[in-house]
Amino acid sequence: MNIKGKFVTLRAPELADLDKLHLWSNDPDIWKLVGGWHFPFSKRSTEEWIKSRKDNNLTEHVFCIDDLDGNLLGTANLVSIDWKNRNAFHGMMIGETGNRGKGYALDSVMAIMRYAFDQLGLERLDGDVISVNTRSFDFYTKKCGWEVDGVRKNFHFRDGQFFDKILLGITRQRYREHIAMCNYWEQEKT
């Protein structure tokens, strides 16, 4: 089953995605704005990563984001799914800069939230942004309805300096309030 937004489809990664996923996994402009370790990825390791994805894994899901024409735009995830406490971690990346600012990211997050809250029955989603990534911070808090849950000082080390990790989250109730306020799913596709 694919997850549908208004402008995007979220689907499982396929080997046909290898070239773009490999390119993005080595793009320093992308990785300086996200957490985690950053080492060069070989095409072989990217291929092995795609092949290792288990569709029946109940706690870790990575999705490829396609536009309506089937062009790969980026990736999103629902990981660390905790079924007992009904929460998960979410992250997202739009690969090429030319595809940013066109509403694909917003539609992807709205589709992920709708799926997580209305289909999976989760109660909350968590995420985080590196403090230097003000664009992502503003996106999640102003456009998607997420709220700041806390800050971890000097958490990320980039280019010789430390940056804070800003913890974000949204509950099912907050999502419903945000959707009612912005009327997202009722708006015409433009």
Image: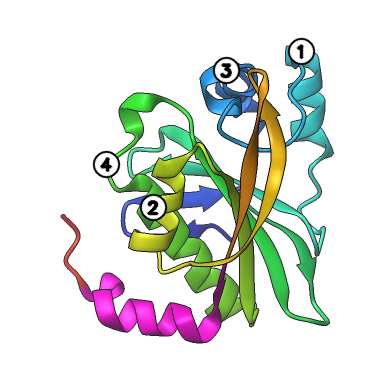
Residue type, label 3: Asp
User: Residue 84 vs residue 140: left or right?
Assistant: right
In the figure, residue 51 lies in which quadrant? top right
Residue type, label 1: Ser
Could you classify mark 2 by the number of other residues whose Cα lies within 10 Å: few (under 14), some (14-19), or many (20 or more)?
some
In the figure, residue 125 lies in which quadrant? bottom right
Residue that label 2 marks: 139
Residue that label 1 marks: 42
Residue that label 3 marks: 27
Residue at 61% x, 36% y: name it. 34
The question of residue 134 being in magenta is answered with: no
What segment carries the magenta color? 169-186
Residue at 71% x, 54% y: name it. 61
Mark sitting earlier along the chain (2/1): 1
User: Residue 45 vs residue 91: left or right?
Assistant: right
Residue that label 4 marks: 102
Mark pair 4, 2: CA separation: 12 Å
Q: Which mark is residue 6?
A: none
Residue at 76% x, 12% y: name it. 42
Secondary structure, mark 4, is loop
Mark sitting earlier along the chain (4/2): 4
Judged by depth in the image, the label closer to the viewer, 4 or 2, is 2
Contact between labelled residues 2 and 3, with CB atoms less than 8 Å apart: no
Could you tell me which quadrant the C terminus lies in? Answer: bottom left
Residue at 63% x, 44% y: name it. 164
Mark sitting earlier along the chain (1/3): 3
Q: Position of residue 118 (x, y in %)?
A: 53, 81
